[in-house]
Amino acid sequence: MSALEPPEPTELHVCHCCLMRLEVSAGGVDLPSRLQEALAGRGLAERTRVMESGCLGECPEGLVTVMVLPDSGSGAHVQLIDPAKDGADLAEHVAALSGAKDGPP
Protein backbone atom coordinates (compact mmCIF):
# COMPACT_ATOMS: atom_id res chain seq x y z
CA MET A 1 0.00 0.00 0.00
CA SER A 2 1.44 3.39 -0.96
CA ALA A 3 1.24 6.52 1.18
CA LEU A 4 -1.49 7.88 -1.12
CA GLU A 5 -3.81 4.90 -0.69
CA PRO A 6 -6.34 5.05 2.15
CA PRO A 7 -5.91 2.40 4.84
CA GLU A 8 -7.93 -0.76 4.61
CA PRO A 9 -11.13 -0.57 6.64
CA THR A 10 -11.42 -2.25 10.00
CA GLU A 11 -13.52 -5.39 9.53
CA LEU A 12 -16.10 -6.53 12.08
CA HIS A 13 -17.25 -10.11 11.50
CA VAL A 14 -20.46 -10.64 13.49
CA CYS A 15 -21.24 -14.26 14.35
CA HIS A 16 -24.48 -15.30 12.64
CA CYS A 17 -24.93 -18.18 15.10
CA CYS A 18 -24.87 -15.77 18.05
CA LEU A 19 -27.44 -13.55 16.32
CA MET A 20 -29.78 -16.47 15.76
CA ARG A 21 -29.51 -17.63 19.39
CA LEU A 22 -30.55 -14.26 20.82
CA GLU A 23 -34.01 -13.76 22.24
CA VAL A 24 -36.33 -12.15 19.70
CA SER A 25 -36.67 -9.14 22.01
CA ALA A 26 -32.88 -8.58 21.68
CA GLY A 27 -33.35 -7.96 17.94
CA GLY A 28 -30.45 -10.11 16.78
CA VAL A 29 -31.27 -9.88 13.09
CA ASP A 30 -31.12 -6.07 13.29
CA LEU A 31 -27.87 -5.92 15.26
CA PRO A 32 -25.54 -5.46 12.25
CA SER A 33 -27.49 -2.38 11.13
CA ARG A 34 -27.51 -1.04 14.70
CA LEU A 35 -23.74 -1.58 14.82
CA GLN A 36 -23.38 0.41 11.61
CA GLU A 37 -25.48 3.25 13.10
CA ALA A 38 -23.35 3.30 16.27
CA LEU A 39 -20.20 3.47 14.17
CA ALA A 40 -21.67 6.29 12.07
CA GLY A 41 -22.44 8.21 15.26
CA ARG A 42 -18.71 8.17 16.05
CA GLY A 43 -17.62 9.01 12.51
CA LEU A 44 -16.28 5.48 11.93
CA ALA A 45 -18.76 4.12 9.36
CA GLU A 46 -16.60 4.87 6.31
CA ARG A 47 -13.53 3.21 7.87
CA THR A 48 -15.35 0.13 9.17
CA ARG A 49 -16.97 -2.79 7.38
CA VAL A 50 -19.63 -4.83 9.24
CA MET A 51 -20.41 -8.31 7.91
CA GLU A 52 -21.94 -11.51 9.21
CA SER A 53 -19.79 -14.60 9.53
CA GLY A 54 -20.18 -18.23 10.46
CA CYS A 55 -19.43 -19.50 13.96
CA LEU A 56 -16.39 -17.84 15.53
CA GLY A 57 -15.92 -20.49 18.21
CA GLU A 58 -17.02 -18.37 21.17
CA CYS A 59 -20.57 -19.05 22.32
CA PRO A 60 -21.41 -16.51 25.02
CA GLU A 61 -24.90 -16.69 26.47
CA GLY A 62 -26.81 -13.47 25.76
CA LEU A 63 -23.84 -11.82 24.04
CA VAL A 64 -22.64 -11.69 20.44
CA THR A 65 -19.15 -12.63 19.28
CA VAL A 66 -17.44 -10.23 16.88
CA MET A 67 -14.05 -10.85 15.25
CA VAL A 68 -12.28 -7.50 14.97
CA LEU A 69 -9.70 -7.22 12.18
CA PRO A 70 -8.04 -3.80 12.63
CA ASP A 71 -7.10 -1.70 9.61
CA SER A 72 -3.44 -2.17 10.53
CA GLY A 73 -3.71 -5.78 9.38
CA SER A 74 -2.49 -7.16 12.69
CA GLY A 75 -3.97 -7.66 16.12
CA ALA A 76 -7.14 -9.52 15.15
CA HIS A 77 -9.16 -10.42 18.23
CA VAL A 78 -12.59 -11.45 19.46
CA GLN A 79 -14.83 -8.92 21.18
CA LEU A 80 -18.01 -9.98 23.02
CA ILE A 81 -20.75 -7.38 22.79
CA ASP A 82 -24.07 -6.83 24.52
CA PRO A 83 -26.92 -6.55 21.98
CA ALA A 84 -28.85 -4.35 24.41
CA LYS A 85 -26.22 -1.63 23.96
CA ASP A 86 -27.09 -1.31 20.24
CA GLY A 87 -23.46 -1.45 19.21
CA ALA A 88 -22.26 1.40 21.43
CA ASP A 89 -19.81 -0.90 23.23
CA LEU A 90 -18.30 -2.10 19.95
CA ALA A 91 -18.16 1.41 18.47
CA GLU A 92 -16.30 2.57 21.59
CA HIS A 93 -13.85 -0.32 21.21
CA VAL A 94 -13.24 0.43 17.51
CA ALA A 95 -12.79 4.13 18.28
CA ALA A 96 -10.18 3.27 20.92
CA LEU A 97 -8.33 1.08 18.41
CA SER A 98 -8.23 3.82 15.81
CA GLY A 99 -7.60 6.67 18.24
CA ALA A 100 -10.76 8.42 17.01
CA LYS A 101 -12.51 11.03 19.12
CA ASP A 102 -16.24 10.93 19.94
CA GLY A 103 -18.49 12.17 17.17
CA PRO A 104 -17.99 12.63 13.44
CA PRO A 105 -14.73 14.12 12.18
Image (cartoon, helix red, strand yellow):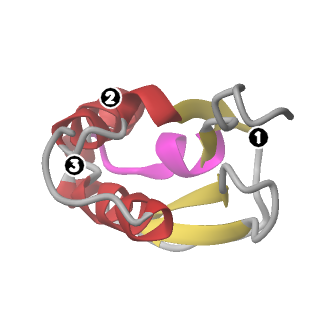
Residue 30, label in figure: 2
- Residue 59 appears in the picture as rendered: no
Magenta region, residue range: 16-24
Instruction: Tell which circle, 1 or 3, labels the residue nearer the N-terminal end.
Output: 1
Label 1 residue SS: loop
Are circles 2 and 3 on residues that touch, CB within 8 Å? no
Element carrying mark 2: helix
Q: Is residue 22 left or right of residue 51?
A: left
Residue denoted by label 1 = 54
Mark 2 Cα-neighbour bin, 10 Å: few <14, some 14–19, many ≥20: few
Q: Residue at x 70, y 70 (%)?
A: 77
Quadrant containing the N terminus is top right
Q: Which residue lies under the disc numbered 3?
A: 86
Magenta residues: mostly which secondary structure? Answer: helix
Q: Which mark is residue 9?
A: none
Q: Nearer the viewer, residue 5 or 98?
A: 5
Picture coordinates of residue 89 (x, y %)?
A: 29, 65
